Amino acid sequence: MAMQANADFKTKLQIWLPKLVLSPSVALMVVFVYGFIIFSVYLSFTDSRLLPSYGWVGLENYSKLWRLSHWETSITNMGIFAFLYIGICTVLGLSLAIFLDQKIRAEGVLRTIYLYPMALSFIVTGTAWKWFLDPGIGLENVMQSWGWTSFEFDWIKNSDFAIYTVVLAAVWQTSGFVMAMFLAGLRGIDNEILKAAQMDGASNWNLYRRIIIPQLRPAFLSAFVILSHLAIKTFDLVIALTGGGPGRATELPATFMYSYTFSRNQMGIGAASATIMLMTIAAIMIPYLYAELREKK
Amino acid sequence: MSVATQDTAIRTGRVVRTLIYLVLLLFALFYMLPLYVMVVNSVKPLDEITGGGMMNLPQVWTFEPWLKAWSSAQIGVEPTGLSPYFWNSIKMVVPAVAISTVLGALNGYVLTKWRFKYDTILFGLMLFACFIPFQIVLIPMARMLGLMGMAGSTSGLVLVHVVYGIGFTTLYFRNYYAVFPTELVRAAQIDGAGFFQIFWRILLPSSGPIAVVSIIWQFTNIWNDFLFGASFAGADSQPMTVALNNLVQASHGVKEYNVHFAGAILAALPTLLVYIVAGRYFVRGLMAGSVKG
């Protein structure tokens, strides 16, 4: 009798064990991800300033937010940055991948060189480019000391151009990774189709335009999703490279949220800006994840 | 990347090939440029940099900047150099990587071999958590760490990194175990093996490649994190990235560019070493895990 109860318990345990093992992770996720998201979104409708407070103010934080020129700058910069960053990384990554796919000698070495920036912290990347682009000691100074005395390059100190230096450093960091994604896609294409098209007299240009590039659709999609979510999350690079300046010239939503929440004590507005960031990423990620997970079933 | 080179159908002429090599080399220079600038300027005296010699090899070689960056540079208020922060990062990274990888392996095992209703939705929710902008959790996380008495501590940072790393580690192990033959698991079950026995004896021995992927990924992400370190670390738990930023952004005194460059290399070395030593296992493991072509 006792033995049977024991055996019963054991089978029951075996049935429940998998869920039991999964439960700590699920609990962490429910509290620290989705619970926190709800809390932050809720705060964005309250009068929180230095500390969370629970006085309901409706959409006031959002309407204040959209009237702030500081936020407008961040959003405009985000538009410029995301457009150029995603565009350049994709074009550069695809081109380098196509070039590397031509039976290149020392391909392994080149790949390693293109990819290593991905291993670095954005703070390291930011530091290196900050001083390289600095007119006082970097490129401008070097060119002038080499005899090109009229050479000027002060983008990083110029509020009209500083955002492009952020693009440059970010492209440097991630384009190699995009190249790797496209290269993996290229290596997966069936050569027989290409050979058949070649027999029909198709030129290299047409092979790429009509057959190869259309087949890279999944790689384009993954690259877009990864790059756009990286773009929206860009924070450390700006902090290290320009500190958001000169003035506010390189502020992005992530740096805006940080300074409004932690140094300006406008937690309600900070939470509202974080909510907008989340919504933007969700609009891209949810359809993508939905399609991916459904496919895998 | 160790994708097998295969016979490409594309044929190119000599001129085009030369051009391609030229472009590839040009970009290799572009990617090497910041590393060159950092290395070369970390071993030269300050006046050679400020005098317009940033691109030149040092005339006088010195390792003073490295020593200073490591042990005596002013970080915040203390002239401690980066070394205490380096150890802070190690103390944070090692447990966080270990815990998140173990949890990811167990989750992946359950989600592929012990499937239940709605497991895909659960996994989708975990996966989405990887991509959220962390700004959305900063405020409640600060409160929560305070409530748990972990504010400003290394264990608090470990918790944060485990929580937001589980999604990725689960993803890796899930994809890897998905192609592992389920018949073996069922056969072992019939032989009376339990949940943990099956994991320990059957799945774990062949999990090497994906464990490498998970460890490298987590190590790189956590070591390089700045946002969580800057938001939640206390004076004696600040990680390397935050300390490096404090060193470089310090507004007082002479800007010692050579020390900044040496410090940047020190902050980059661990992940760079991992990439050089184990990078190829990373891609190999990733390929082994992906079922989709």
Image (cartoon, coloured by chain):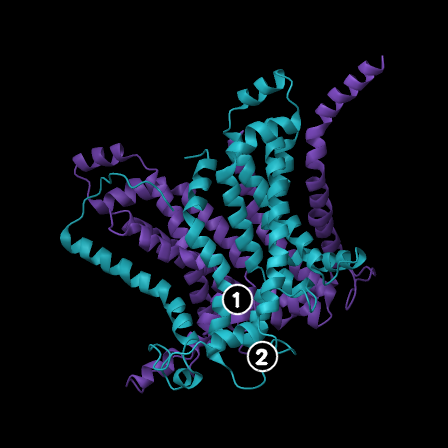
Chain colours: A purple, B cyan
Residue B165 image position (x, y, % from top left): 61, 48
Question: CB atoms at circles 2 and 1 under 8 Å apart?
Answer: no
Apparent side of residue B184 relative to residue B292 in the rendered image (left or right) = right
Apparent side of residue B7 relative to residue B126 in the rendered image (left or right) = left
Which residue matches tag 1? A123
Chain identity of mark 2:
B
Q: How many marks?
A: 2
Identify the secondary structure beneath mark 2.
loop
**Residue A73 visible in the current orientation:** no
C-alpha separation, residue under disc 2 versus residue under disc 1: 14 Å
Asked if residue B272 is positioned above or below residue A194 in the image, the reply reads below
- Asked whether A81 or A154 is in front, the reply is A154
Q: Quadrant of residue B6?
A: top left
Identify the secondary structure beneath mark 1.
helix
Tell me what residue is drawn at x 48 percent, y 36 percent.
B289
Residue B178 image position (x, y, % from top left): 53, 30
Position of the C terminus of chain B, as image quadrant, is top left
Which residue matches tag 2? B250
Residue A58 image position (x, y, % from top left): 77, 59
Tell me what residue is drawn at x 32 percent, y 54 percent.
A109
Apparent side of residue A249 relative to residue B2 in the rendered image (left or right) = right
**Dot 1 crowding, Cα within 10 Å, few <14, some 14–19, many 20+:** many
Asked if residue B281 is positioned above or below residue A167 in the image, the reply reads above
**Dot 2 crowding, Cα within 10 Å, few <14, some 14–19, many 20+:** some
Q: Amino acid at mark 2?
A: Ala
Tell me what residue is drawn at x 56 percent, y 65 percent.
A236
Q: Quadrant of residue B25?
A: bottom left
